[in-house]
Each structure stands twice: as structure tokens, then as C-alpha cells.
Amino acid sequence: PGSDKTGQPAPPQQAGATVMFSVGDVTVKKTDGTTAVLSANNTVVKDDVIITGPDSFVVLQVDETGTFRINENSVFSLSRIKDSGDTECKLDKGSVYSKLGKIRKGESCRINSVTYLASVRGTEFLSSYIEGKGEVSVLDGKVLVEAVSKKFEEKMVESGTGFSITDNEVKTYRLSSRNILLLKKFSLYDYVQDLKNKSESEMKQIFEDILKKEKEIDAEIKELDKTVPQI
């Protein structure tokens, strides 16, 4: 680990998440109250609060865990990062897509929303809390959902299924074709091995390839919207 100028062992490096991509208005609020623009290759540490504006998003990667795409109009933080192998996130509003294919046996990841807790050990799902409505939509794997208020029994939400909670009701439902396409769009942000050593041009190429695929999915969604009435 090395030592500082006094000859004492240097403190262990704080675990963090690396910013893969940042688009639009994305800021980070530090625990000392200072704020800064969040850019690619920045490091986000425990309790940093990420705030995204309209038409903005940021993708984080936690080593040996997976990626988190924080979507527009969201407030998100990491309250634990690889702490005894576990990662814990806090979603105050908006939505985050978690792609957690790198979690090892015995480790877990949890998303804490205002109304629910979602626990996983390797899966892909969207968590949201928007205007009083909490939702979990699972593309792949299983997510255990618990109520903060004990309003409902814990539920296992499986692949292709959604779960929502409001003040008035709790329900589970099959995801629509449109929902699944949207999740597939968010899922394009794969874990990048050896991220810290990737050059700016390599990351730019990865991002451009993703944007092409996003446009293809957007076109599919547009076609679907022509044929399926939106409720």
C-alpha cells in the first residue's frame, strides 16, 4: 500500500465507481457540500450524490460488480461500494438500470428506494421512483423486493416481469414489448474489462457503437408505438 511522509502506512484507497459515460447535465455533490460536473473517467465514492438533469444520463462501473445507468431527472448515491463484497445504492428519485453480471458467490447488491428495497446477486433490472410510484422491471434474473413500510410481503420479481407500489396499490405484471425494448436499450452498457487502462479513443468507439444500437432500438419502439395504442 506504501506509506505517507511520516513513515506511517498509507490509508487504504477508498473503493469507488468509475464514470464510463456522462451525457448532458450530470453533477456530483460531495459529502462536504461542494458540487462538480461529472465527466467520463471521474471516480464516484461512497455517499457522493449524483444528480442528472432532463435528457441526461451517466453510466458508472463498479469493479467486479457491474454497471449502473442513472437516467434523466434522477438523484442517486452509492452508500456501500464493495464493502465485504456488498454494494448498496440509494435512489431518491428517477431511475437506474443495474446490470450486475460480475457479482461473485456470497456477494450482493441492493437498491434502496423511498418505498422499496431491491436485492440481487447478479441480474439486470430497472429501479424507479417517480412522483410517488416505485417500480422494478426485470429483464434477466430475479430481484427480491421488500417494502420499506412493510406494506407488502417480500416478492421475488422474475425475468420479463414488473412490480409497482403506490400509496393505493401493489401489483405484479408482465412487461410489455415496449418495456422490454426500453430495458434492452439500457442494457447496452456492458461491463468493460480493465476500464481504467482504456484510452479515450477506445471508450469513444465503444460509446459510438452503443449509440448506433440505441438508435435501432428507438426505431423499433417508434414502429411499435404506431401499432400499439399507448395507455
Image: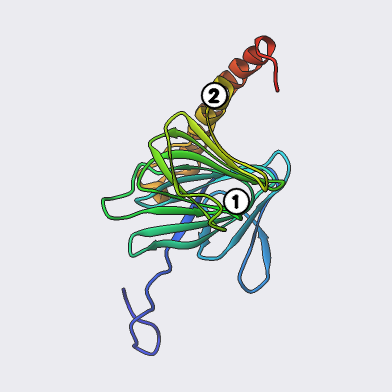
Amino acid identity at mark 2: Leu
The residue labelled by disc 2 is 181
Q: Is residue 150 left or right of residue 224?
A: left
- Is the N terminus in the top left, top right, bottom left or bottom right quadrant? bottom left
**Most foreground residue, 58 or 73:** 73
In this rendering, the answer to whether 228 lies above or below 28 is above
Q: Is residue 188 left or right of residue 211?
A: left
Pick out the residue farthest to the left: 105
Mark 1 or mark 2: whose residue is earlier in sequence:
1
SS class of the residue under badge 1? loop
Identify the residue shown where x is 34% and y is 45%: 102
Amino acid identity at mark 1: Ser
Q: Is residue 208 visible?
A: no
Identify the residue shown where x is 36% and y is 53%: 108
Query: Residue 179, located in which quarter of the rendered image?
Result: top right
The residue labelled by disc 1 is 39
